[in-house]
Amino acid sequence: MRGLRVLVTTILGFVFGIVCWLLASSGGPMPAAMAWSIILSRTLLGFVIGISAWKINYLVHGILLGFIVSIPMALASLPMPGKGFKIFLGTLIMGIIYGFLIELITHFVIKEKSAGSNGKAEPATPTS
């Protein structure tokens, strides 16, 4: 079942990458390298969600990983003149939304949550 989870989350990441690219290019054409960067970043998000073994609530899992994986792409937009900060925030917010949706859809498609998750946040165990 684990391999199926990774496959489904990666495919969903790719689909959301296409959606993200279409939304980002709605203002006009963009360089091919930027389009592929967007698609691959969201595909990577799906893959990371699929392989992650964090033992937290599956929806929180998607939100956190969506935020974390989106940071590099968001930082790359900061130097853009005039609208860099707006794109930075939009990239992080959309990453959170895509991560949430990837986990939610995966949960309903294959009835499997993130690794070790029982739907509830588990207390951290101290290490010695």
Image (cartoon, rainbow, N blue to C red):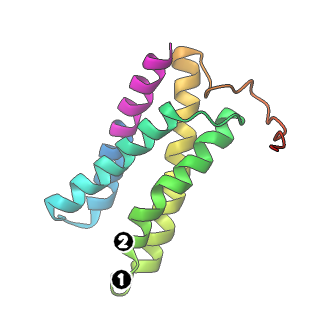
* 20 horizontally vs 114: left or right: left
Q: Amino acid at mark 2?
A: Ala
Q: Secondary structure at mark 2?
A: helix
Mark 2: give few (<14), some (14-19) or many (20+) Cα within 10 Å: few
Residue 87 drawn above or below residue 6: below
Q: Residue at x 47, y 53 (%)?
A: 69
Residue 50: image x %, image y %?
A: 49, 31
Pointer 2 and pointer 1: residues touching (CB < 8 Å)?
yes
- The residues bearing labels 2 and 1 have C-alpha atoms spaced at a distance of 7 Å
Q: Which mark is residue 76?
A: 2
Q: Secondary structure at mark 1?
A: loop
Residue 91: image x %, image y %?
A: 45, 62
* 55 horizontally vs 2: left or right: right
Whether residue 10 is in magenta: the answer is yes
Q: Main secondary structure of the magenta part?
A: helix
* 74 horizontally vs 112: left or right: left
Residue 88: image x %, image y %?
A: 46, 71
Mark 1: give few (<14), some (14-19) or many (20+) Cα within 10 Å: few
Report the quarter where the C terminus lies.
top right
Q: Which mark is residue 40?
A: none
Q: Residue at x 39, y 38 (%)?
A: 13
Q: Residue at x 74, y 23 (%)?
A: 118
Residue 38: image x %, image y %?
A: 31, 54
Whether residue 103 is in magenta: the answer is no
Q: Amino acid at mark 1?
A: Pro
Give the labeled residue for mark 1.
79
Q: Which residues are magenta?
A: 1-14
Residue positioned most to the front: 128
